[in-house]
Image: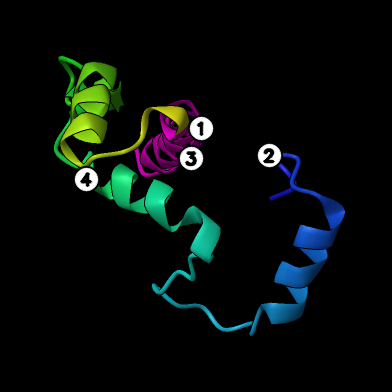
Amino acid sequence: MVAVNAPQAVIEAAVRNYSGQDSDDCEVWQENWESVLLFLAMGTQWSISPTGQPIGINYGSLESTMKMTSVKKKKRASLFMDVRMMESAALDVFREKQ
């Protein structure tokens, strides 16, 4: 959260709610749910380099997916930025695993 400049109040709330236990589960706040579902819907739309490494999401497919899932036009730009943020975080994880 610090890396993406989340407001201090949000960071403090997350720290208060952190149980200290490792888990594969991930809590998604209600206001982020639509963005997460869109990101998950893009799971098969990653562009892969010739060496087999993910290099990013196919944004043309992202636009099509938003249309097919009836995302309102006024929400698309915001959701696009949310997916890009999750894409960046996922790419960091992929790089760490190399």
From the image, state whether disc 4 or disc 1 is nearer to you: 1
Q: Closer to the camera, 71 or 16?
A: 71
Residue 30 position within the rendered picture, expressed as x and y whole percent measured from the top left: 50, 64
User: Residue placed at 80% from the left, 49% from the top?
Assistant: 7
> Which residue in the structure is indicated by mark 4?
41
Amino acid tagged 2:
Val
**How far apart are the alpha carbons under marks 2 and 4?**
23 Å
> Which residue in the structure is indicated by mark 1?
78
Q: Main secondary structure of the magenta part?
A: helix
Q: Sequence order check: which comes first, mark 3 or mark 4?
A: 4
From the image, state whether disc 1 or disc 3 is nearer to you: 1
Alpha-carbon neighbours of circle 2 within 10 Å: few (<14), some, or many (≥20)? Answer: few
**How far apart are the alpha carbons under marks 2 and 3?**
10 Å
In the drawing, does residue 92 fall left or right of residue 41? Answer: right
Residue 68 position within the rendered picture, expressed as x and y whole percent measured from the top left: 15, 35
Tell me where the magenta segment starts and ends, as one range.
75-98
